[in-house]
Amino acid sequence: MYLGIHADRKATISEIAGFYGISRNHLVKVVHDLASHGYIHTHRGKGGGMFLARPACEINIGNVVRHAEPNFHMVECFNPQTRHCPIFAMCNLKGMLNDALGEFLAVLDRYTLEDLLKRPGGMGLPQFMEAGAGRATTQGR
């Protein structure tokens, strides 16, 4: 979202970590993953940074979530290697959870990064962030 709002320039890991108040080390891993899946481009060294690899309207949220979560094993029986449940054959829960997961991803598939950057009838996320209202604080931690 930060890169979508600042699409006119490169952003750094330190800048984004500072804005959201998150771990720089964790963000390095996230950036590497997003770059390896072609969502962002990164440049190292002086003048380096990152930016979106394609327009926000072409980045599907459902696909990003699928890349971020290699599996959705909510319960043991979703994973064939760990499936040891004695009621697996007659359990209806796995089917319900699988249906719910399908619906969850189907909803996310209807949205793009561009959709996340706008808010009908009010201050849009870009203006909110530029005003500093979304800036995380370290007070009280």
Image: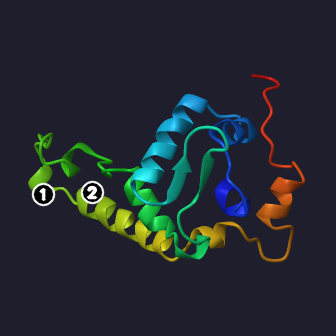
Point out residue 110 in the picture as x, y percentages from the top left corner. 51, 77
Neighbours of disc 2 within 10 Å: few (<14), some (14-19), many (20+):
few
> Would residue 100 be found to the left or right of residue 2 on screen?
left
Q: Is residue 1 visible?
A: no
In the image, 40 versus 79, the foreground residue is 40
In the image, 15 versus 21, the foreground residue is 15
Q: Amino acid at mark 2?
A: Leu
State the residue at coordinates (55%, 47%): 43
Q: Amino acid at mark 1?
A: Met
- Asked if the residues shown at circle 1 and circle 2 are in contact, with their CB atoms under 8 angstroms apart, the answer is no
Residue 41 vs 53, above or below: the answer is above
| Residue 129: mark in rendering | none
State the residue at coordinates (54%, 29%): 25
- The quarter of the picture where the N terminus appears is bottom right
| Residue 90: mark in rendering | 1
Point out residue 140 in the picture as x, y percentages from the top left corner. 80, 23
Instruction: Give the alpha-carbon distance from disc 1 to disc 2, as whole Å.
Output: 9 Å
